[in-house]
Image (cartoon, rainbow, N blue to C red):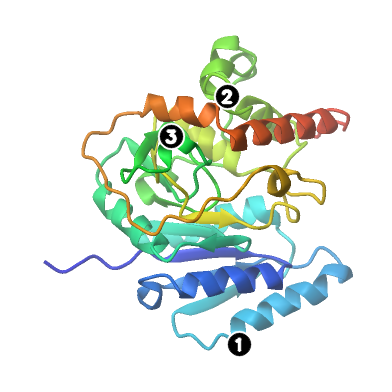
Amino acid sequence: MRSPEPAPIAIFAYNRPDRLHSMLRSLMRCEGFHDASITVFIDGPKDDRDAKNVAAVCSLVSNLGLDNVTSKISETNRGLRTSIYSGVTEIIRRHGRVIVLEDDLVLSRTALNYFNAALQYYANNDQVWSVAGYIYDAPPLRGSTKSIILPFTHPWGWATWERAWTHFSLSNSPQPEVLESRAFRTAFDMGGLYPFTKQLENSIQGRVNSWYIHWYYTIFQHRGLSIFPPNRLIENLGLNRGSHGGALNPQSLLVERPPLLNIVPEFDTAVDINYPAIDALRNCRELRVQRFIARAGSAKRNLMPSKRR
């Protein structure tokens, strides 16, 4: 039987030609790269200071000389939130599925095989809403060769299907009384895994400009699940710059990066949440650091005036 066509890839870039260059180099080393249709969505500059770097990003993509890579350049600055929503929606409507990458990621050589295999394996399983390529480094999970099923998702390299994305809108949020409920907060934060509720609250109030937290809320709302590898197939090298990074972000100083996984983990027909994996993630060093960073960021943002949408 003929194998299905590889999923199209949407890459979102802005003003970091150095990061995009590193990401594209890793992507071109991936097995299956030349069979993929790739669109690079480039956001327009915010001001004259950004214009030079955005122009360098455009030049980098245009000079690749690859038939399977095209670019779409915005005339205005839309921001990552709007860029991802509109770009993913565009690709999904044409192809029914998509692999989503940002310019600060580096991929394992087997990452595309993993995404395409998972997209095919779970294509008709309505319980599964996304495929994540990144997972926090939890020592008890490192030696496993099996994928992990969890009730949340991650934005650093992911994939989804039209059947899931069609439920999503950037304004999708719980009612105020639900957001303030202790039971909701416990469930949405997965018992202290990460302060997702605070991130959602900050987005609703306009203190952050997030697409991801509303996507996670949509998955949570529909009791959806995500497929994760036991060890990351993707690394994020842009935590000290970009939309959600900062020069003082301690992630790179306090957390070691494990080697990227170079196999495609096994998938299971039984779609059961891996609760021991959640315990391992909750207690791992990386998530302890991430929780600290998130809470410090929220405390800083709480000093800002609300910009309710």
Q: Secondary structure at mark 3?
A: helix
Circle 1 or circle 3, nearest the eye = 3
Looking at the picture, how far across and down is residue 120, in whole percent? 27, 54
Q: Quadrant of residue 87?
A: bottom right
Q: Quadrant of residue 226?
A: top left
Residue at image location 37% in from the left, 71% down from the top: 31
The residue to which callout 2 is attached is 174
On the question of residue 306 being in view, the answer is no
118, above or below 230, in the image: below
Looking at the picture, how far across and down is residue 60, in whole percent? 65, 81
Give 155 or 259, whichever is nearer the viewer. Answer: 259
Give 146 or 40, whichever is nearer the viewer. Answer: 146
Residue at image location 24% in from the left, 45% down from the top: 124
Give 272 or 75, whichever is nearer the viewer. Answer: 272
Q: What's the amino acid at mark 3?
A: Pro
The C terminus appears in which quarter of the rendering? top right
Q: Quadrant of residue 288?
A: top right
The N terminus appears in which quarter of the rendering? bottom left
Badge 1: few (under 14), some or many (20 or more) residues near its Cα, within 10 Å? Answer: few
The residue to which callout 1 is attached is 63
How far is mark 1 from mark 2, CA to CA? Answer: 45 Å
Q: Which mark is residue 118?
A: none
How far is mark 3 from mark 2, CA to CA? Answer: 34 Å
185, above or below 66, in the image: above
Residue at image location 33% in from the left, 66% down from the top: 6
The residue to which callout 3 is attached is 140
On screen, residue 104 versus residue 139, left or right, reads right
Looking at the picture, how far across and down is residue 271, in whole percent? 27, 33
Q: Secondary structure at mark 1?
A: loop
